[in-house]
Amino acid sequence: MSLVSKFSRAQSSIFTINTCVVNTFFSSHLNTKFYSTESAENADERPAKKERVFFREQDEVDGFKVFDVYMNKKKDERSFDQRVKRTYPRVQRDRFARYNRMPIDQDWTNVWPTASPFKQTAVPLPVRQGFVKNMIENDGLPPEKYANVELIKIPNFLHLTPPHIKKQCGAIKKFCTPWPKELKTDEDCEKNFPIEITTSTYIYDGPSVRDDRARVVKLQIKLSSLNLDKRSNDKLIKLAEDRYDPATDTLTLITDRCPYRRQNEDYANYLLTTLYYESKQCEDWESEITEDDMRTFEWEKSKSKENILNTIRNIEKIEDETQAVNLKQVKTYQNNLSKIFNEGETDTNILQYKQSVLNLLKIKTA
Amino acid sequence: MSLARNLNKILSLRSLAAQNRLFNLNNNLINKSLLINSVQKRYLSNEQEPKIEIKISQKAVPHFFRCSVNDPLKHNSVHLNKFYKVDEKDLKVIDPFQECLTREHYAEFKAFNETALMIRQPAIEVIDYIKKLDLSLPAYRFVLYGNENGTGKRSTLLHLLHYCQKDNWLLIHLPNWSAVLRRSKESQPSTYKEGRLDTPIDAALFLKRFSVQNNKLLKELNLKTTKKYNWSNRDSSPEGTPLLDLIEYANTRIKYASDICGAIIREIKFQTNSNKYKVFVAVDQVNSFFGPTRLKRADKSEIKVDDITIARNFKKLLKNDWCNSVVVSTIGSVGVILPAPDRRTKFYDTSISIQNRRRVPCSLHYEGPLTPAHLLKKEGFYYLEPFIPIEVPSYSDSELLTHYEYYRDRNWLQSEDALTDDGREEIKFLSGNNPREFMRVCQTI
């Protein structure tokens, strides 16, 4: 026997095995089909399927009736559209549940003394929470509180109702002292307690009481309450940069670099004291201040004085400086010019300036 | 539609021009009966003659928006809010190169065949002041400003120039000076002092303008130099050369134009003490003198305003260390020189969608407040101090009405809707009483 014939025989044997498998698979499948047709004949066990009714006469071609699958089909009584809606059994009103047996005038603080997750038996309120897909599901209403996980997940404030707060405040009241009689108005408070410290505490329902943001301390003070002279006041404002608000004359220091609130508060106080003493100190180089460095326009130190004295010397023939400065028109000019630079160029300010220049140059106006 | 409108407008203009030409011709004939030949006689004897007469009689009816007095010396508050006609000969003297106003203005003047300016409050106010001034005192400085752009600062300046030209003032006029600081036509290092920059063409242009404006007066006065000037090792002009000769010399040797410019300014400034003449200095966009420039040296170092020879000399005119002089200047956003966009790092207008955004680099515009202290800054403020600020406001209702009627008279408004009262109100609303906007809105209808 040649090698080739051996190989071909082996191949044919494999093929035969394969066909066997296919045959068995088909036969089993077919068997089930056959079974289903056979069972339909037993009218006792299953409801008899109605015979198909055609509402149009079937066409005949060469003596055979043509089976039209789609056109002649009559709809079933129970079609897909006419399906009956599913109904969900409602939770019936349980007369013996705890929330139904609670008296109306009960003390709520005793029922719910501290923070705790939601308990449906203890809350006599018809609360609902959750998502419904459409009107079919649960009649379009959110699920009730019974066995509702959504309600348990969210934080509640049932322990912080007005009666709770009233009761707790009443309990602490014995530790409080009366409001001092001297501090009747807000101005009195500002005068006696110029430093205002603002902190915030964060309370929420969770495993930890601590919050990172609680460490931030805001210290506010009015600069006028520091009783500084003009030079040191200007220096403090220069040092404070954007922490000073000129509109309200307040200095605001916000500290958050230490981990605890008390540490930050100490640091804010430290900053304030250093700012205060630093601005009080007068360094040698401070005498070199130029006009551009100044916060507000000052006519006496500006180049404008020189210009005006020159023109006055030509117009009025006055050589003495102090005499020239004390002239009426020079003083009004000085006021109006500083208004323009300090308050801004409004229409009235420019008009006033113009008028003072006309007076200075002795131009007659009609 | 728009083409038809334009055609209508052109036709009407042409008819206007023809009418005017006929009018002039008629006038000439009446004044000089020299040109009448047989053909013209026949022409006049035809039926057309009475028609012309009718037109003349129509012209003779005074309109309420026209001022009967065309001489600026006689203008006062009675003539407020009216248009007066600037004589063409005067205009050629005052504004020889058509630089005083914008191009749009000159286009309109050409179309209307006349130059009409509105007599407005700020101009009358300054004229009133100038009439009362004691000129033996140091120079008076006026600063024209407006809270918006396009309120008519330059036309006020033109009116004042006209007044001073009629009143025999020596005019020194610097229109749109900031253009030189942005990009001068030509520049070369100065021979007089190292580090300075000469701008010969700009200086020559100034000298030309100056000689045209004051030709008559300079011939009368016959001003001469008081000192010997050396332009270079070879060239010099001796003491006692007339200023007109110096200007001619600058025409032939443009290289020395900026130095000659400085010499002339110096001479004019020093000789005012003689009380022979009075000087009127008109500067447009004066705030450009107190800011940066866009010019650069060969080694790319920045040039300040004081490094430019003529700018340095013009700045001396703004000081009040001389007498017999009035300085009227305007300030505006054009004078604020912002850094030029770099060619390598182009930036585009991001407010426009990418599809519609053109590949044209953005140019920066000043958009801050337009009041004196903001534009002049402290440097300029101290330099001009004490100056008289004069606001040029936008149109009042009556001013807008007269301008509207003037346009209507000139057949500038073609759309029928624009001629109704509602149309006028709409134009007023669209322009927001701003003269420039009003002009632009009326151009399209």
Image: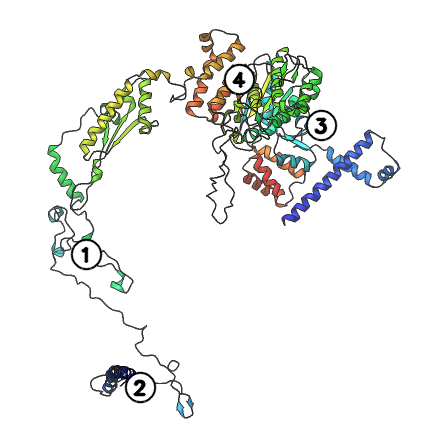
Q: Earlier in the sequence, mark 4 or mark 1?
A: 1
The image quarter in which residue B250 lies:
top right
Q: Which residue is mark 4?
A: A358
Question: Relative to A106, is B30 above or below?
Answer: above
Mark 3, residues whose alpha carbon is within 10 Å: few (<14), some, or many (≥20)?
A: few
Provide residue B23's location: percent of width, then percent of height: 77, 35
Of the 4 image quadrants, the one containing the C terminus of chain A is: top right
Name the amino acid, label 2. Glu
Q: Are marks 4 and 1 on the same chain?
A: yes
Q: Nearer the viewer, mark 1 or mark 3?
A: 3
Gap between marks 2 and 3, in whole Å? 115 Å
Q: Residue furthest bottom?
A: A63
Q: Are marks 2 and 3 on the same chain?
A: no
Q: Are marks 3 and 4 on the same chain?
A: no
Of the 4 image quadrants, the one containing the N terminus of chain A is: bottom left
Q: Which residue is mark 3?
A: B89
